[in-house]
């Protein structure tokens, strides 16, 4: 804590301690005021301005220091100054004192609280920034909440000081009038219970509910404004229509059918979306074949003289399609029809907030009416507008599965997860791969040591990794394809035969009616939604890649639950989408898996943390499998075992991370993981040993010294 904070804290502590040490509270009791009432009236008659100033100063001080007695002073204000002037004086004094308490709390404690608990407070902070005035106004209207607690807690949030002041002034006004008025009748009041009668408390509770009712009315007015130019159908044929049959759309439709809603699923391309057809499934099938080739080259490590593998690239790619077809029934029309979902193959367009027009392959058009809509239109590969790229026959993660001839020289544009996975797979299959990344390292979202770990493996396998290379132009020179890159201000030429672009994906937000309805998109070019995944039209929701902020199959499914449940039951209760524990993995070799914060993000956000690192090279099973490489890195709250985030690199990292995901989701710390039996010998033991690293660093040394002394005494 800085010297200025220590000084302010010392002054506050001294004033509060003096208040109680000198028993000044006796002067802020109802009995004392009654005894001195005549003298106080006389002093006020003789010195009106001085009395007002003294009263105002004391009231501000009592409120600012959160001392008991503000209620009695409010009553006294009414008794001394009358209803009008008493209300004016108390209103400004209480608001000013509350603001000073708010500022003191902010100055002394907010940085510490946000640093220590920032991750847990993220949702609260977002709510305060968006509608903090409403929360504060509601709390001010209900005297059941101690005002001094509200002052101190609000100081820990991002609420602006001016907002706090004017909302406090307005919100406390009704209560101030009631108490000041009661003070004018002070002679009749026997105790404070006389003020807080059941009827009065009921009135306050009604006042507290009023802002919520007002917000509901505002929401209805906004909805009427949004829907003003549309004609609502008299009845709805369906409860829900889902656009897109990828991961998010399938889960949304499944949930709706499970709760007996009438739901229609519209898909213009293939059931299963990108994940099944062009993403997760085919890429992992390709990676498995490529890994087998890499393992064959390591035969001597496993005690064998040699191992040779003959393969045909076209057959490998056919195997990929066979895997897709094997999984395909899980996402098929037949399965979802049996579940109760109406599946329509066609191109959907939202023509009104309750109507969708579907154009089928035979040219026919159907119009569907529905109470709610879930948009799960997915995303597509982004091809940057680099000069000449349109002449290169550019492959993407959507189209690469169609090739049957192995590229001799392949340029992979992009160093993210997709680019890195495909880079290694094609290299292992025999292509000469050059990976081009404009940033200083590949896998930029991971901590530097994990990026370096993967890059070292790429280089060892013969991949030409070019970081800090920004693609400027594509050319064809003498029949030869050439990429010109800018590296530290100089041009670098890279010759190649085929180009695979993997620089990211862009949400599908055009062509199905968003423009006509005026549904906006974000700067990330996703559909704009609120915390409930609602668009500006309260009955239209979005989930998955089209909504962001994460483009993972599992997060699309996660969001789909919120979107479908809110769409079906939002009039009764809505649920905010929870992104507090989102895991992901990059399936390179070594795999890199992560959940929560990594060290890079913790530093950027100013979040305090401790690091516990366990090297998988020490793990018995990893040694036995010749996979003794990798790291488990755990970030925890300083001095505690609460997990802030975990990154794992190594064999089976995507599986190992699951234990930490469950622990974070259910509030379990490293002590619980350490106390859980893990089968020997398994890779999962790495998680327990990482917890052991933390425990060893926090061993009670003083206690252990005493125990050592006890054992020495026992030996005689």
Image (spheres, rainbow, N blue to C red):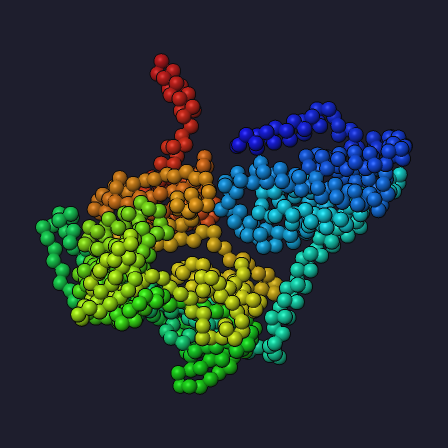
Q: Is residue 474 left or right of residue 151?
A: left
- Asked if residue 280 lies left or right of residue 66, the reply is left
Observer-nearest of 327 and 95: 95
Q: How many marks?
A: 0
Query: Which quarter of the rendered picture does the C terminus lie within?
Result: top left
Residue closer to the observer: 23 or 438: 438
Residue 168 visible at all: yes
- Residue 314 appears in the rendering: no
* Closer-to-camera residue (499/131): 499
Query: Residue 651 in the image: x percent, y percent?
Result: 28, 50
Query: Where residue 482 sits in the image (x, y, percent)?
Result: 22, 65
Q: Residue furthest top?
A: 716
Instruction: Please give the name of the residue rendered at 53% of the width and 32% of the height, measured from the top-left corner.
Output: 2
Residue 154 drawn at (x, y percent): 62, 44
Measured along the vertical axis of the image, is residue 185 above or below residue 579? above
Above or below — where is 434 with respect to 175? Answer: below
Question: Splitting the image into 4 quarters, where does residue 16 fall?
Answer: top right
Residue at image point 40% right, 60% down? 551
Answer above or below: position of 313 versus 140: below
Q: Is residue 112 above or below residue 511?
A: above
Image point 66% across, 67% down: which residue? 221
């Amino acid at each position: 804590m800085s010297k200025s904070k220590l000084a302010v804290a010392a002054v506050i502590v001294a004033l509060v301690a003096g208040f109680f040490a000198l028993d000044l509270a006796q002067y802020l009791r109802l009995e004392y005021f009654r005894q001195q009432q005549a003298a106080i009236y006389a002093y006020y008659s003789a010195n009106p301005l001085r009395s007002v100033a003294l009263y105002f100063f004391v009231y501000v001080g009592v409120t600012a220091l959160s001392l008991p007695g503000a209620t009695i002073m409010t009553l006294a204000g009414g008794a001394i100054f009358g209803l009008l002037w008493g209300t004016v004086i108390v209103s400004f004094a209480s608001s000013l004192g509350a603001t000073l308490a708010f500022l003191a709390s902010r100055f002394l404690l907010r940085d510490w609280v946000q640093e220590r608990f920032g991750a847990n407070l993220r949702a609260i902070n977002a709510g305060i920034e968006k509608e903090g005035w409403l929360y504060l106004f509601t709390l001010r209207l209900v005297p059941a909440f101690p005002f001094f607690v509200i002052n101190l807690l609000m100081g820990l949030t991002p609420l602006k000081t001016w907002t706090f002041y004017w909302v406090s002034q307005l919100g406390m006004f009704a209560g101030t009038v009631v108490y000041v008025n009661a003070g004018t009748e002070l002679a009749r009041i026997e105790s404070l219970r006389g003020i807080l009668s059941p009827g009065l408390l009921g009135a306050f509770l009604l006042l507290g509910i009023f802002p919520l009712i007002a917000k509901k009315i505002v929401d209805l007015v906004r909805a009427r404004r949004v829907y003003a130019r549309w004609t609502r159908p008299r009845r709805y044929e369906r409860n829900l229509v889902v656009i897109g049959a990828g991961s998010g759309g399938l889960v949304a439709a499944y949930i709706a059918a499970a709760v007996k809603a009438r739901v229609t699923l519209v898909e213009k391309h293939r059931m299963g979306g990108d994940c099944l057809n062009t993403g997760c499934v085919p890429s992992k099938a390709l990676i498995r074949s490529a890994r087998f080739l890499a393992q064959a080259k390591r035969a001597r490590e496993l005690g064998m003289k040699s191992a040779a593998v003959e393969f045909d690239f076209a057959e490998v790619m056919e195997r990929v399609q066979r895997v897709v077809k094997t999984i395909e029934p899980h996402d098929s029309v037949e399965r979802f029809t049996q579940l109760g979902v109406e599946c329509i193959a066609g191109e959907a367009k939202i023509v009104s907030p309750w109507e969708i027009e579907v154009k089928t392959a035979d040219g026919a058009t159907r119009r569907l009416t529905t109470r709610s809509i879930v948009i799960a239109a997915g995303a597509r590969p982004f091809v940057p507008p680099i000069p000449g790229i349109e002449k290169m026959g550019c492959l993407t993660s959507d189209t690469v599965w169609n090739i049957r001839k192995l590229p001799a020289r392949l340029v992979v544009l992009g160093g993210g997860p997709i680019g890195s996975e495909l880079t290694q797979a094609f290299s292992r299959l025999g292509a000469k791969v050059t990976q081009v990344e404009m940033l200083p390292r590949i896998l930029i979202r991971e901590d530097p040591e994990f990026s370096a770990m993967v890059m070292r493996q790429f280089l060892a396998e013969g991949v030409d990794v070019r970081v800090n290379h920004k693609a400027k132009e594509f050319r064809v020179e003498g029949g030869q394809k050439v990429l010109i890159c800018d590296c530290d201000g100089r041009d670098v030429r890279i010759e190649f035969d085929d180009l695979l672009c993997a620089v990211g994906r862009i949400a599908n937000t055009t062509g199905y009616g968003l423009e006509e309805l005026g549904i906006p998109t974000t700067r990330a070019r996703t559909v704009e939604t609120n915390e409930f995944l609602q668009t500006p039209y309260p009955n239209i929701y979005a989930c998955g890649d089209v909504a962001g902020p994460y483009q993972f199959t599992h997060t699309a499914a996660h969001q789909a639950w919120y979107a479908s449940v809110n769409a079906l039951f939002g009039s009764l209760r809505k649920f905010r989408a929870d992104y507090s524990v989102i895991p992901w993995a990059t399936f390179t070799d070594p795999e890199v898996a992560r959940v929560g914060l990594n060290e890079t993000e913790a530093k950027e956000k100013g979040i305090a943390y401790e690091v516990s690192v366990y090297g998988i090279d020490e793990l018995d099973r990893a040694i036995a499998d010749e996979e003794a490489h990798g790291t488990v890195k755990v970030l925890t709250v300083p001095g505690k075992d609460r997990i802030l985030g975990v990154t794992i690199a190594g064999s089976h990292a995507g599986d190992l991370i699951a234990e930490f995901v469950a622990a974070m989701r259910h509030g379990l710390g490293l002590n619980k993981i350490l106390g859980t039996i893990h089968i020997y010998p398994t890779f999962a033991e790495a998680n327990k040993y990482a917890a052991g690293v933390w425990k060893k660093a926090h061993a009670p040394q003083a206690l252990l010294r005493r125990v050592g002394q006890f054992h020495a005494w026992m030996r005689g």
